Image (cartoon, grey):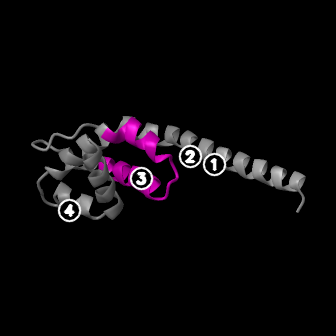
Amino acid sequence: MNWVDAIIARIGRAFHAEQILLARRQAVFELWKYMTAARDIDPKKPIYPAMLQVVNTLELVAVCWDGEIVDRAIIRRTFGTRFVELYQAVDQVPAAAPWKAGREFLRGSPATERLYDELRRAQ
């Protein structure tokens, strides 16, 4: 490979990396829809279907974090505080027949727990 080909290859790799980064940052807009639609949870008067929607939203964000589908720095800055608030509210919801406790729902998603722990350490 001559030096011209090497430079072209290097430019191609740099361009490809920039395109991937841009795509990862743009994916945050899809998550934004879900996070802004997530309703606050009152652990003393929970609405269980709303809680389940929040749990699913938290898991979606966490899976995107784990798979590096969305830039982690963007998730941390954009959703970090809200993610922690929602997680903690769900975690405090007690069981009520036929629903499980919020903590049980959260424990069903290891990715959600890992992201919560990561965000708590960063605060």
SS assignment at label 4: helix
Q: Quadrant of residue 81?
A: top left
Magenta: predominant secondary structure element? helix
Rendering coords of residue 55 (x, y %): 30, 52
Q: Is residue 99 visible?
A: no
Q: Tell me the residue that label 3 is attached to.
A: 60
Residue 108: x and y in percent read: 29, 64
Asked whether the beta carbons under mark 1 and mark 2 sit within 8 Å of each other, the answer is yes
Q: CA distance from mark 3 to mark 1?
A: 20 Å
| Amino acid residing under circle 3 | Leu
Task: Give the residue number, with chain letter if any, for mark 1.
Answer: 20
Question: Which residue has dot 2 on it?
Answer: 24
Marks 2 and 3 sit apart, C-alpha to C-alpha, by 15 Å
Query: Circle 1 sits in a helix, a strand or a loop, which is it?
Result: helix
Is 50 in the magenta?
Answer: no
Residue appearing at x 19%, y 44% in the figure: 89
Residue located beneath label 4 in the image: 104
Q: Nearer the viewer, mark 1 or mark 4?
A: 1
